[in-house]
Amino acid sequence: MTSPYAKELEVAQLAVQRAALLTKRVFHEKAKGTVSKDDKSPVTVGDFGAQALIISALQANFPADEIVAEEESAQLRADPSLRDQIWEHVRSTRLDDAASEEAVLGGAVKDAEAMLDLIGQGNSQGGARGRIWAIDPIDGTKGFLRGGQYAVCLALMVDGDVKVGVLGCPNLPVNDSAALTADIGANQTDDEGRGVIFSAVIGQGATSRPLGSGALAKGQKISMKPITDLSSASFCESVEAGHSNQSESAQIAQKLGITKPSVRMDSQAKYGSIARGAGDIYLRLPTSKTYQEKIWDHAAGDLIVREAGGQVTDTTGSRLDFSVGRTLASNRGVIAAPAAIHSQVIKVVQEVLGQK
Ligand SMILES: Nc1ncnc2c1ncn2[C@@H]1O[C@H](COP(=O)(O)O)[C@@H](OP(=O)(O)O)[C@H]1O
Ligand SMILES: [Mg+2]
């Protein structure tokens, strides 16, 4: 008997792998100097291109499913030159394993118009009913632009619950036991030793495998690091101070007895990193009263960490609720930690944030 969600997992992994390959090609083109350093278009081209390729794979396999994706296509219809740049990448990005690509992901996107139609399919409002995919084609936009960490993210929710999560992290070390760092070394165009894909299916654990561009290698189980002594713990948070309150996180760390400075890393690569035990805790503390976290920024990472033995909640200790629309409107911030110490972390978070 095949395990539940086997087909969804296979499609999601290969779709993320292909989309990640597109983003890498776009980045390398930028690094070669064919676009100027301040030009934001690489992220636009990468974002739309990756989204088109992922939606194409989902529609070929699960045509009845809804899709929540970060990007909207309206902007592209008014900008033919941008559309053509994106189409060039969508048309030409192929996995080395062409047979699997076609068999699993379906045929190529027909033309630029078909590509725009696909991009526009990510407009579901989300909610508590049915099968809904959440896509963030390039999470960690800032990281992508500076040649740092970013992630291609895809998750399936069924009746508001995340069932499958896949994160492609082109710039994280392949090696699960590599130290927790956002640094990718001096030579930013050399892929050696980098590129990992994290996956999880509900009730089946979490895995990592090399991202590559050929046949997907067999995954290995990952799990969070067992931790008893918080003084040796390491925690990660956003690079962007506007995304997470870094002075409150420093206070929390100090109260918990954590001695190491935080590791600042863009994107859901943080979830993958703690899930494989490279780090222990991920703190995301609200910087404003009004910002609502987006479901595509958290769905895959939430499941991967929980399946690796962690707990993921908001700052009040409630589970993230993916059933209320395109945002996590019922939650505030994110606290992810190994199950054994999660309540201890929440207690200190509440002391510092003044919540009772
Ligand atoms: N004020 C805010 N608070 C928290 N997250 C925010 C934010 N403004 C934007 N973001 C989200 O933070 C994500 C990046 O998270 P991180 O800081 O962990 O790298 C962004 O995803 P994109 O990069 O896909 O736009 C964006 O959706
Ligand atoms: Mg994002």
Image (spheres, rainbow, N blue to C red):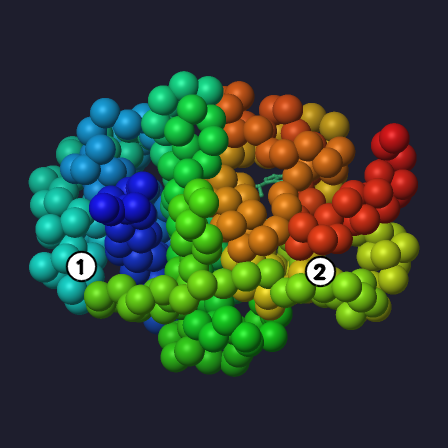
Residue in view at x 55 percent, y 76 percent? 178
Residue in view at x 64 percent, y 24 percent? 330
Whether disc 2's CB lies below 8 Å from ligand 1 is answered no
Q: Position of residue 22 (x, y in %)?
A: 29, 57
Work out whether residue 2 or residue 77 is closer to the camera in this orientation and state it.
2
Q: Mark 1 highlights which residue?
A: 94
Residue 127 visible in rendering: no
Instruction: Name the amino acid, label 1.
Output: Arg
Q: Mark 2 highlights which residue?
A: 235
Residue 8 visible in rendering: yes
Q: How many marks?
A: 2
Disc number for residue 117 = none
**Residue lying farthest to the front in this orientation:** 1
Residue in view at x 42 percent, y 78 percent? 193
User: For this view, does 211 lie left or right of residue 83?
Assistant: right
Q: CA distance from mark 1 to mark 2?
A: 37 Å
Q: Position of residue 195 (x, y in %)?
A: 40, 68
Q: Under tag 2, what secondary structure?
A: strand
User: For this view, does 328 lie left or right of residue 113?
Assistant: right
User: For this view, does 27 lie left or right of residue 149?
Assistant: left
Q: Position of residue 154 (x, y in %)?
A: 39, 44
- Check if mark 1's residue and mark 2's residue have beta carbons within 8 Å: no
* Mark 2 burial class by Cα count in 10 Å: few <14, some 14-19, many 20+: many
Dot placed on the residue nearer the N-terminal end, 1 or 2: 1
Whether disc 1's CB lies below 8 Å from ligand 1 is answered no
Q: Quadrant of the C terminus?
A: top right
Q: Nearer the viewer, mark 1 or mark 2?
A: 2
Instruction: Name the amino acid, label 2.
Output: Phe
Q: Is residue 169 depicted above or below 289 in this figure? A: below
Q: Is residue 51 depicted above or below 304 in this figure? A: above
